[in-house]
Image: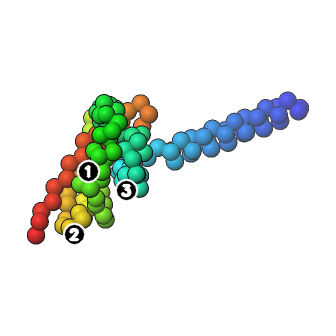
Amino acid sequence: MRTPRLARLVIAALLLSLTASSQAFAQKEQTASQFYMKYRAAFDKAKTIDEILPYMAKENKAQVEATPAADRAKMFEMVKMMSKLTDVKIVKEERSADGGATLTVTGTDMDKHASTGKVTIVKESDGWKVGKESWSTKAS
């Protein structure tokens, strides 16, 4: 009689474990929009390009790594200056057939002008990555 009872306990424990694992996996899986906002927070805090390399698509990362180390700091300073935005919001997320997404994003530039951006988020083997990002500002 102990064997069936023990078997039921083992099965119940396995089911609980599987449920907890699937919930943990679901919590780790994030949308492209959530990923991009996490990237923006990291970008805003970053002091070096190396801090945001994990967020970059392979081709972008390869371009950065191909840049001579002495020039990377200057390049990053320029990118940071040109991409200084506040109040960044995602207006629309469109999923693409390849598993990636295109985000329509708004923000305010350092001159207090409204900016609109298009961001391509790609799905790579290790998760979401920032592909192309372009912004335009209409001066009032």
Say what amino acid the circle numbered 1 marks: Met
Q: Local crowd at mark 3 within 10 Å, few (<14), some, or many (≥20)?
A: some
The alpha-carbon separation of the residues under discs 2 and 1 comes to 19 Å
Which residue is rendered at x = 26% and y = 56% of the image?
Answer: 81
Q: Which residue is mark 2?
A: 112
116 or 32, nearer to the observer = 116
Point out residue 7 in the picture as x, y percentages from the top left corner: 79, 32
Residue that carries the numbered disc 3 in the rendered image = 44
First of labels 3, 2 by sequence position? 3
- Residue 38 visible within the image: no
The residue lying furthest to the right in this view is: 1
* Viewer-side residue, 125 vs 73: 73
Quarter of the image where one finds residue 92: bottom left
Q: Where is residue 97 shown, x and y percent of the image?
A: 27, 35
Instruction: Say which element carries label 2.
Output: loop
Q: Which residue is mark 1?
A: 78
> Residue 52: image x %, image y %?
39, 44
